[in-house]
Image: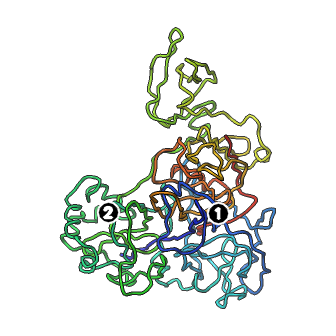
Amino acid sequence: MTTPLATQRQSSLRSRRCGTALAFVAVAVLSIEGLAACRRADAQNTKAEPSAAASGPGLSSASAGPVDSSGVPVYEEGAEPPIVALSGKSGKRDKPQTSSKRIGALAMLTEIRQNPSPTARLLGYLRAGGTAEVGDAPAGREGCPGGWYRIQPFGFVCNGSTATLDMNHDVIKALSRRPDTEATLPYMYGIVRKPGPIYAVLPTREQAQGTESNLAKHLDKWLHSDDENGAGFRADYWLRWKDPSKVPSPLEAWEQKRTDDLPPFLQLGKFFPGNLSGLVKDKSTIAVGQAKHHNGFAIFDTLLAEGRRYAITTELVAVPVDRLRPIEGSRFHGYQIPEEIDFPFALIRVEGVWGFKSEKGKLVKAKELPRRSAVKLTGKQNFFNGKLHFETADGLWVLDREASRLDPAKRMPAWGKNGERWMDINVTKQTLVAYEGTKPVFATLVSTGEAGLGDPEKTKSTKRGIFRIHTKHISATMNSDVTGEEFELQDIPYVQYFESGYALHAAYWHDDFGKPRSHGCINLAPEDARRLFFWTEPKVPPGWHSVLRPLTGSVLFVHP
């Protein structure tokens, strides 16, 4: 079995709350409190740099297709179905790799420039293992002895330390599987429940026993437990992309000392290619880090090595699955308008909400309304005991503090009249409504900054105003420095920056949507994040991991 392995390592947000730096730190991670944070600058949102003129042979000019008002190339999906629709249905995937010549990324951030020059405008990134079709000859060699190659649909990549034309390179082969955009989350995710080593190899049993004290006792307890801390808890979760019928149980695998069929570059005890994590300083030790309690890892594959299953992270390091708890993320998602609901309606924000009947001026419990359900309203409202209530279509009354009423925009902004896609985010109601021009098409609950309407410069609140999405990453790692205990998480899915250090993104580690929770970013349920990511502008071209386009992305209107 040839085993592909993962993609990624992104920026680290390293100023006071969620600043970024493109430094490749040890295990790229983000604090739960901090990614809940999202603050201060994101280095992947690199400012546009001066363009250099294209020169030399190759494919056509980087700007041969459509460009925006600032001259930045624009990827348009055309008549093909979107990769992911607002309904959640997945359309086309990356086109088959039929080109006789391709370039592949060797770094977690392989730059795509607008022209063949290191000083040209940055358009986006390929991720390690990702490949793109190129022309037969380089378009120039400025600052790149190996040559700049024009990729599809536009932009140039340097054939050098971060990219190669050799499709047999170990990094390209190891990371051939791309993020799974057809699933709610692009990777498997696990959070550390028992601290232990991070390995730069698939260790033999002898190597693991020499590295982990009390390993036999730890594994005996794990293998014979069916609770959430044992091998019996969601063992199937780690078999994504595998045939479970052909995989032995954890106990059988251990007793039989089973090892998966491994390619040459992943043999037991052999260091993973690329050192993408930056953790390997020399090859004197196979344990290159510590998986701390509550750290979260994005996992591209799992492999058996002499009976023990290891999670292979997106940075090509290994963590034993017996030290992780599988994380699936919230199953909640929003509603299409008008297919699933129409105005006026309310989204039930909390548990234990009742619809009341009005009998002789008093309210009597009639029906419990499920959390996060969409309830059709009549438009009528009334005060009972000094509290505002909304009337539902079936004649019940629901308290406004427990249900977020949604109505279409009363005054349509210019960008809506111009037909743009935009989002209305209400901090008080914790709601997001997506519009195509003047037509509302999707609504959901979000989690904005925990400080509510506080000052974003002084508190953990979300910045209000009118913004445009300028940078998007299929997944990104954001580090946050926060007060108190820091929970570190890797590869946050579907990140969309709209202001320095502020982003929309999936939050796979909590299920509190409808309540303020973050340190400034706008947390979305994973499925909502996936759907909206592929709906907004700028679009991420097929095969790319990230795109940067200032000034002309989709509008966010964030208000009280």
What distance separates the C-alpha of mark 1 from that of mark 2? 33 Å
Residue 277's mark? Answer: none
Residue 207 spot, x, y in % from top left = 27, 80
The residue lying toward the viewer, choosing from 161 and 167, is 161
Residue placed under numbered mark 1 in the picture: 41
Q: Are marks 1 and 2 in contact (CB under 8 Å)?
A: no
Residue furthest bottom in the image: 145
Residue 37 seen in the figure: yes
Q: Residues within 10 Å of mark 2 (few under 14, many from 20)?
A: some
Tell me the residue at 66%/48% (across/down): 455
Identify whether 393 is placed above or below 550: above
Q: Secondary structure at mark 1?
A: loop
Please tell me how many numbered marks the rendered image carries: 2
Residue placed under numbered mark 2 in the picture: 194
Identify whether 57 is placed above or below 63: below
Quarter the C terminus occupies: top right
Q: Secondary structure at mark 2?
A: loop
Quarter the N terminus occupies: bottom left
The residue lying toward the viewer, choosing from 488 and 134, is 488
Residue 78 seen in the figure: no
Tell me the residue at 58%/65% (across/down): 13
Answer left or right for 322 relative to 10: left
